[in-house]
Image: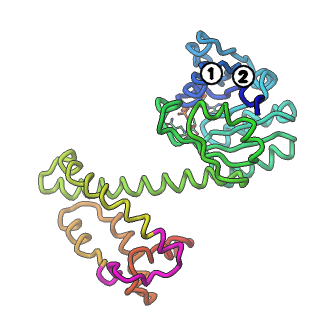
Amino acid sequence: SARAHEPQTVSILGLGAMGSALAAPLLDRGHVVTVWNRSPGRGEELVERGARRAGTVADAVHRSGLIVTCLLRYASVRETLDPVAERLRGRTLLDLTTTTPAEARALGAWAEEHGIEYLNGAILATPPMIGAPGAQLFVSGSAEVLARTRTVLEAWAEIVYDGADPGAASLIDLAMLAAMYQMFAGLFHGAAMAATAGMRATDFAARAVPFVTAMVPHFAGDAEIVDGGDYSVPGQQSLHFSDLSDIIRASDEAGANSSTIRAVQALIAEQVDLGFGDDGMARIYESLRRPHA
Ligand code: FVH
């Protein structure tokens, strides 16, 4: 709507690296920005650029229709917002703090109890990426509230809406981070193995990055197998032939820590033991989609 393109009043609570990065593009777009930080001394440059400084959380809430929290973790969000719950009534809260999905839902229930419109967001970007191409913001909660705030949020990143469940954005964000961290752990393990033959990590990276880059797109095909629910697709390397014991022995012989690759081997072994050794690698999804035995 035309109204959505009008300057909006936005208060940012938390001027850490990310909160400060979020304020700048809003000022550039002419929004009326109020900033608050628990400790003094942060955000001077934002005030110089036109942000208004609130002395208290209550003052920050009072000044804007949209309140953005970008704090350390869930406990700090509740510590900051609980005392001003009634002042938030009728306003919109967007929490960009990294929280678990259950915490995001708990904040949603708290917001509903106090008549606060609520969105949860997960930022997939570093502070310097905010406002630049490549930054993504996963958002979940009310689609209608998102429609009203979208032009503000678009100043930061490309918006990806993950549905009405307030925990969804956080869940998908953390799932993607889980994938990324495990991939990096694998690369570091490989570097540690190669180092025992005198290879520098940078030389290992020069060899491993193109290989892993070429392999990663195959995940999309495995994902189709997972969604189809039939793991016996012909043409795949079967789990019988995906025995990782050579890699484990090589790592052990080299004196490197083989715990990451042993974890993968255990997933394969579990499915082989269950009688699914003829299926392909995608089958380990069945071991991962339920709690660890
Ligand atoms: N920085 C990044 O790259 C990542 C990208 C992905 C998403 N995260 C999440 O964003 C949240 C904030 O991260 P940050 O980088 O701004 O963090 P810091 O620079 O450490 O600033 C933390 C701010 O939180 C304030 N704070 C901490 N505890 C409390 C509390 N109990 N009550 C009120 N405020 C609190 C802190 O204030 P102060 O220490 O200066 O007084 C900072 O303003 C985070 O969830 C990331 O996971 C960023």
Q: Is residue 221 above or below residue 205?
A: below
The label on residue 29 is 1
Q: Residue at x 59, y 16 (%)?
A: 46
Q: Measured from the top left, where is residue 56 in percent x and y?
A: 75, 21
Q: Which residues are magenta?
A: 223-241
Mark yes or no: residue 207 visible.
yes
Q: Is residue 215 above or below residue 229?
A: above
Mark yes or no: residue 34 visible.
no
Seen as rendered, the residue at the extreme left is: 198
Q: Measured from the top left, where is residue 275 in percent x and y?
A: 43, 90
Picture quarter containing residue 55? top right
Kind of residue sitting beneath label 2:
Pro
Closer to the camera in the image, 162 or 270: 162
* Disc 1: residue Cβ within 8 A of ligand 1's nearest atom: no
Whether residue 226 is in magenta: the answer is yes
**Label 2 crowding class (10 Å Cα cut-off): few <14, some 14-19, many 20+?**
some
> How far apart in space, not on screen, are marks 2 and 1 (Cα)?
8 Å
Q: Residue at x 67, y 27 (%)?
A: 12
Picture quarter containing residue 25? top right
The label on residue 171 is none
Q: Mark 2 near mark 1, Cβ–Cβ under 8 Å?
A: yes
The colour style of the image is: rainbow
Q: Is residue 140 above or below residue 225?
A: above
**Label 1 crowding class (10 Å Cα cut-off): few <14, some 14-19, many 20+?**
few
Kind of residue sitting beneath label 1:
Arg
Closer to the camera in the image, 196 or 95: 95
Question: What kind of element bears circle 1?
Answer: loop
Q: Which residue is mark 2?
A: 7
Ligand 1 rendered quadrant: top right
Which is nearer the N-term, disc 2 or disc 1? 2
Whether residue 12 is in magenta: the answer is no
